[in-house]
Amino acid sequence: MTIQQLIKQMPLQVLTPELETNASFHDVYTSDLLSAALAKVTEDHVWITVQVHQNILGVASIKQAAAVILSENLMPDQDLIKKAQEKNIVILLSPYTSYETSGMLYNMLKEEKNGNK
């Protein structure tokens, strides 16, 4: 699944609209612990978190996450969005909890894997 397909299937707000959204991902990691995300996230993941501080950009950049989804409509400041654009990190905003967002993505990826796009 691509980030663009994800955006079309879920009510996500794109906070970095200038960035390309054609990157593919095949897994999701949900954690608010930066150390856990640093250990588990790969370029094949979308990372879901409620953290909205600058350190998420460091983790997302090092791990080359396909995108970061901020759950619960937790809006980061404009400085974070600007730095995300500079670092080429797609930031999406979900109105749902991390649990709900994770479940939705799980179901979408499962359907895609089973050929039910």
Image (cartoon, helix red, strand yellow):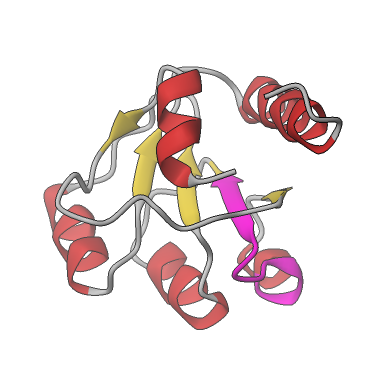
Q: Residue at x 28, y 56 (%)?
A: 20
Q: Quadrant of residue 25?
A: bottom right
Q: Position of residue 47 (x, y in %)?
A: 59, 52
| 60 over 20 or under it: above or below | below
| 86 over 89 or under it: above or below | below
Q: Residue 13 magenta-drawn?
A: no
Q: Residue at x 79, y 29 (%)?
A: 115
Q: Quadrant of residue 42?
A: bottom right
Q: Position of residue 17 (x, y in %)?
A: 18, 44
Q: Position of residue 9 (x, y in %)?
A: 50, 20
Q: Residue at x 48, y 20 (%)?
A: 10
Residue ranking furthest to the right: 114
- Which range of residues does the magenta coloring cover? 38-48
| 58 over 101 or under it: above or below | below
Q: Residue 40 magenta-drawn?
A: yes
Instruction: Using the image as rendered, state which of residue 45 and residue 115 is in the foreground.
Output: 115
Q: Quadrant of the N terminus?
A: top right
Q: Position of residue 104 (x, y in %)?
A: 68, 22
Q: Quadrant of the C terminus?
A: top right
Q: How many numbered badges does the structure rendering display?
A: 0
